[in-house]
Amino acid sequence: MSRETTGPKPLSRRQALVLLAGVPPLAFGLASDSSRVSPGGRSSMMIRVALLSFWHVHAHDYVQQARANPATTITAVWDETPERGRAQAHALGVPFYEQAGVVLVVSLPRLSSGSTLAIKHILDRKLLGELTEVRTRLTHDGALRTRQHPQGWLPPYFFDPQQAAGGAMIDLGAHPMYLARLFLGLPQSVSATYASLTGRAVEDNATVVLRSPQGTVGIVETSFVNPFSPFTIEVHGTQGSLLYGTPDGILRIRSSVAGTPGTSQWSVWTDIPPDLPTPFSQWVTHMQQGTRARENIQAAIDLSRLMEAANRSAAMKHPILLDAFPQSGR
């Protein structure tokens, strides 16, 4: 990795994603030459972290996580916009580098929540019978123009189709999309409807319908223009239904399957496992143990296929077969 001397032409978000897609997003880690001895007597390495791009509003969250984790130290910065990268590197007191030899980390945080794990457990046990519908929804009001935020609280480049490669669906909609993929599996076809309530160049209100070969339907909803719509998961089957986040963070179920809550009323599902470690912590553990997050990478590849199909469907105004996109990154 060589230090930057003369800045290249800035890359768009899409170009940067394509450039990074061939390697395991956001951080590249190297074991340092020095090691420490843990309280249990085991040697542990210090992982040097390079932060890749400050384009997204959550980039600073990862700065805080890297600083808070005792196994990591920030040592370098890369950004597709050199001026922004140099400023962030200066603020952190580390060098700014050109892009080279990075390892991609994909953060899909809602896969780690206890509620997600509980829902997946219910579905694996077929406590709802055969699936008929999966609905996932996540929204916020980042595009709404208010007195406090005349242009909305999202940065203006979130609405630039060249930089953002899309709008609400590719950004916020990624979370309900990968949850739908987890519960439903990969669909056969993808049909998307995008709209812009605020007149931006990209969608701020969107719905995607997924259809499986078996006839199960997935509905993925997202928006930048709803201040109070709750994060929602609904799953329906031939013998039951479950609801989460409508509006509270409680998992409710109604099922006619033997051994589960009866059909007379909705019951609260209390068997919720603890959250898994954050994606950042999981990445650190993989670095320490020399393992790879294969399921995470495949989930990210599947998510990319679904998003590209949704964007194409919205542009062409008809369903898109998922087989039109590569099935793996190999």
Image (tube, grey):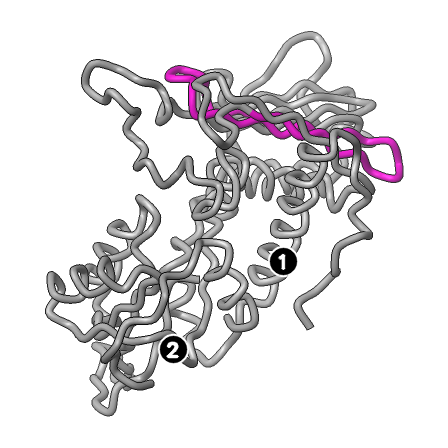
Place of residue 206 in the rendered image (x, y in percent of width and height, measured from the top left): 58, 26
The answer to which quarter of the image holds residue 265 is: top right
Question: Which mark is first along the chain, 1 or 2?
Answer: 2
Identity of the residue furthest to the bottom in this view? 33
The residue that appears at 23% across and 87% down in the rendered structure is: 35
**Residue 77 falls left or right of residue 253:** left
Place of residue 207 in the rendered image (x, y in percent of width and height, measured from the top left): 62, 26
- Figure quadrant of the C terminus: bottom right
Residue type beneath disc 1: Ile
| Residue neighbourhood size for the residue with mark 1, other residues' Cα within 10 Å, grouped as few (<14), some (14–19), many (≥20) | some
Q: Is residue 152 in the magenta section?
A: no
- SS assignment at label 1: helix
Place of residue 70 in the rendered image (x, y in percent of width and height, measured from the top left): 21, 68
- Figure quadrant of the N terminus: bottom left
The one of 7 and 19 positioned closer to us in this rendering: 7
| Residue neighbourhood size for the residue with mark 2, other residues' Cα within 10 Å, grouped as few (<14), some (14–19), many (≥20) | some
The one of 121 and 261 positioned closer to us in this rendering: 121
Q: Is residue 210 in the magenta section?
A: yes
Q: To which residue does mark 2 refer?
A: 288
Front tag of 2 and 1: 1
Proximity of marks 2 and 1: CB atoms separated by less than 8 Å: no
- SS assignment at label 2: helix
Residue type beneath disc 2: Gln
In this picture, is 294 found above or below 235? below
The residue that appears at 70% across and 64% down in the rendered structure is: 328
